[in-house]
Image (cartoon, helix red, strand yellow):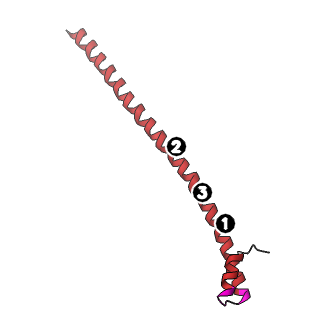
Amino acid sequence: MATLNMDLFDALKAAGVDDPTARRAAQSVVGQDANYVKFEDRLDRFEGRLERIEKDGSEVKATIKLHGWMIGAVLALQVGILLRLLG
């Protein structure tokens, strides 16, 4: 038997809804609550993944900046060697 949201069932009965209809409505809300909890869990996992991606992105930017400086230094040394050889 499906789980029943008794608060909703009682409220529907007090509002004059017949018993089978109130029971089905209360049972359907329980299933929606479970779906909402699953959605919240998936959203939390997604936010965690997004934070890791943002962290990785900042590390990649720092690495690219370092590589730019390294290429500049190597290029400067090569130009210096070339000028010394030709001069």
Other residues around mark 1 within 10 Å, as few (<14) / some (14–19) / many (≥20): few
Name the outermost residue toward the left.
Answer: 87
Counting from the top left corner in percent of width and height, residue 68 is at 35, 29
SS class of the residue under badge 2? helix
In terms of image quadrants, where is residue 43?
A: bottom right
- Give whichever of 23, 57 is nearer the camera: 23
The circle drawn on residue 34 is: 1
Please tell me whether mark 1 or mark 3 is closer to you in this view: 1
Q: Disc 2 to disc 3, how far (Cα)?
A: 16 Å
Q: Earlier in the sequence, mark 2 or mark 3?
A: 3
- Please say if 87 is above or below 62: above
Other residues around mark 3 within 10 Å, as few (<14) / some (14–19) / many (≥20): few
The circle drawn on residue 42 is: 3
- Please say if 20 is above or below 80: below
Give the residue at x 30% y 17%: 78
Q: What residue type is labelled 1?
A: Ala
Q: Mark 2 points at which residue?
A: 52
The magenta stretch is: 13-20
Asked if the residues shown at circle 1 and circle 3 are in contact, with their CB atoms under 8 angstroms apart, the answer is: no
Q: Which of marks 1 and 2 is nearer the N terminus?
A: 1
- Give whichever of 43, 3 is nearer the camera: 3
In terms of image quadrants, where is residue 74?
A: top left
